[in-house]
Image (spheres, helix red, strand yellow):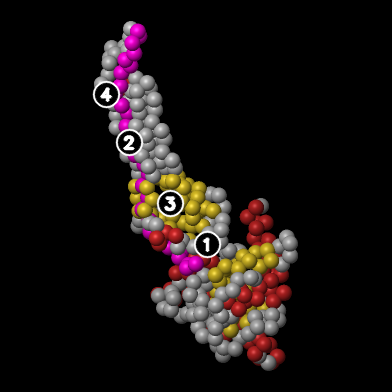
């Protein structure tokens, strides 16, 4: 299934049904009178976040959603049938923006959360509604009220606990593959990952968390270089950023600072999230190189630096335990 995280669609709720003009005409009943019923209500447009979806690819092929009109009223004071609601299922984490792509209309960040985006039109009154003591035979009935219509943008921000960031070919996809059942494409050239990937890390029967791997950033990503920074939205909801540094590179401090600069340019709030720095591919380094590079990176960042080898899984259990502890603490803070 292809990954799509943005889509533009048209939605329109149903018009209300029309009221009718009718009169009671029954043999042996001396007094008749108006008995035209009201129209039924038009169908609503509702968006609902459901599990099991992680892409907006369905909206590439279906871009128009219209609800039906309410039923017209009829004689004997019968109200027209209300039209069925149109429920549009979207992945958890979908945001709905107005056509200007800036005005946020809804953020469906929890399973089962829904929003009534376009309300169906009310039904028109039949002539029975206008009967008074002085107007015994009204010949007025109203048309149904029109529904609402609009173009909206859908933007998906994947729900994950940990966000992987780093330069292309830093080993993010390898880490995702050895720590979860995800099977991302892995190769020895940059930009192997072209779209975000999710993986569920399960430590035991009671502890698990979700990792999001996004395409690598390069210098100038905030200005559109490489794949740009458009996929950074998928790690905005993460509790912690896992910053992977390729230990075989000669300028690891410069690379770390460059990624930090791109995160700041994209969103200072995202850049301020807790960060775990990991020196990866350490199976290719000598003990002296490990020590020197770890010390240099720790001095520049002012934070603890962990050692990891995605290929041999050295340091992996310790890293996963630390990540699980961070995720658990973040969830407790939200609940408290």
User: Which residue carries the number 2 mark?
Assistant: 145
Contact, mark 2 vs mark 3 (Cβ under 8 Å): no
Main SS, magenta region, reads: loop
Among numbered discs 1 and 4, the one appearing first in the sequence: 1
Q: Which residues are magenta?
A: 1-29
On the image, numbered disc 3 is attached to which residue?
105
Helix, strand or loop for disc 1: loop
Q: What's the residue at 65%, 83% (across, down)?
A: 311
Label 4: which secondary element = loop
Using the rendered view, name the quadrant where residue 81 is placed. Answer: top left
Q: CA distance from mark 3 to mark 1?
A: 20 Å
Give the vertical position of 150 relative to 304 (above or below): above
Q: Residues within 10 Å of mark 4 (few under 14, many from 20)?
A: some
Give the label, 3 or 1, closer to the camera: 1
Residue 274, percent from left and from top: 60, 68
Which dot, 2 or 3, sits closer to the camera?
Answer: 2
Drawn side of residue 180 relative to residue 129, left or right? right
* Residue located 34% across and 23% down the image: 75
Residue at mark 4 = 140
């Amino acid at each position: 299934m292809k990954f799509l995280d943005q889509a533009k669609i048209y939605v329109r709720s149903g018009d209300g049904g029309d009221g009718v003009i009718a009169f009671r005409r029954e043999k042996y009943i001396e007094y008749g009178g108006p008995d035209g019923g009201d129209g039924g209500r038009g169908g609503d447009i509702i968006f609902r976040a459901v599990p099991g979806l992680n892409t907006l690819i369905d909206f590439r092929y279906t871009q128009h959603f219209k609800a039906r009109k309410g039923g017209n009223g009829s004689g004997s004071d019968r109200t027209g049938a209300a039209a069925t609601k149109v429920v549009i299922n979207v992945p958890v984490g979908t945001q709905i923006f107005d056509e200007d792509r800036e005005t946020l209309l809804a953020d469906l960040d929890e399973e089962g959360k829904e929003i009534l985006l376009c309300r169906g039109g009310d039904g028109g009154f039949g002539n029975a509604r206008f009967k008074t003591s002085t107007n015994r035979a009204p010949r007025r009935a109203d048309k149904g009220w029109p529904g609402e219509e609009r173009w909206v943008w859908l933007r998906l921000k994947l729900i994950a606990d940990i966000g992987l960031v780093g330069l292309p070919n830093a080993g993010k996809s390898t880490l995702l593959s050895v720590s979860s059942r995800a099977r991302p494409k892995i190769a020895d050239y940059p930009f192997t990952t072209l779209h975000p990937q999710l993986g569920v890390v399960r430590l035991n029967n009671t502890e698990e968390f979700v990792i999001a791997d996004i395409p690598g950033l390069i210098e100038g990503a905030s200005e559109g270089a490489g794949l740009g920074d458009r996929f950074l939205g998928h790690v905005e909801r993460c509790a912690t950023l896992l910053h992977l540094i390729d230990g075989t590179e000669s300028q690891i401090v410069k690379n770390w600072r460059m990624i930090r600069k791109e995160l700041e340019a994209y969103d200072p709030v995202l850049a301020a999230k807790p960060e775990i720095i990991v020196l990866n591919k350490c199976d290719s380094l000598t003990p002296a190189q490990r020590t020197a590079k770890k010390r240099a990176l720790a001095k520049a960042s002012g934070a603890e630096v962990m050692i990891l080898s995605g290929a041999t899984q050295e340091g992996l259990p310790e890293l996963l335990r630390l990540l699980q502890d961070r995720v658990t603490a973040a969830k407790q803070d939200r609940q408290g």
